[in-house]
Amino acid sequence: MLWKYSEMGTIMSKKTVAIMPDTQKILETMGNQIKMARLRRNLATELVAERAGISRATLWAVEKGTPTVAIGTYAAVLHALGGMDKEFEQIAKDDEFGKKLQDLNLSSRRRAKRSK
């Protein structure tokens, strides 16, 4: 976390997020899809922001795919668009790679040899 001083001399925190270019493109695509969902429903930014409990500026940041916006805010906007937040349940649901790694790390149980 970086620290900076405000004009009044108080210390304020400034969050920085390291995002890979491919991830940034995914966020931008998701933001654009959220914007298109809002427009298809003919909903004003003011209404969606109010329903989500955020400012219009934050909604615009969501629609741009800004990485510093909390994931809970994305979920709130999707919910405000008519329950689209249920899509979050699909994230990492079919983790085939993770399942294969887990299977490789499973060891079979072996009994100890009996002493005679």
Image (cartoon, rainbow, N blue to C red):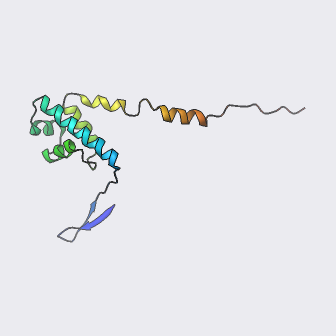
Instruction: Tell me if I can see residue 73 in this picture.
Output: no
> 94 or 115: which is nearer to us?
94
Residue 25: x percent and y percent?
A: 29, 44
Residue 31: x percent and y percent?
A: 22, 40
> 5 or 91: which is nearer to us?
91
Residue 36: x percent and y percent?
A: 17, 34
Residue 28 sits in quarter: top left
Residue 19: x percent and y percent?
A: 34, 51
Residue 10 sits in quarter: bottom left
Who's the residue at 48% across and 31% down the image? 96
In the rendered view, does 93 fall on the left or right side of 115? left
Quadrant position of the C terminus in the picture: top right
Who's the residue at 18% across and 40% down the image? 53
Instruction: Tell me if I can see residue 32 in this picture.
Output: yes
Who's the residue at 13% across and 29% down the image? 40
Furthest residue in direction bottom, as rendered: 9
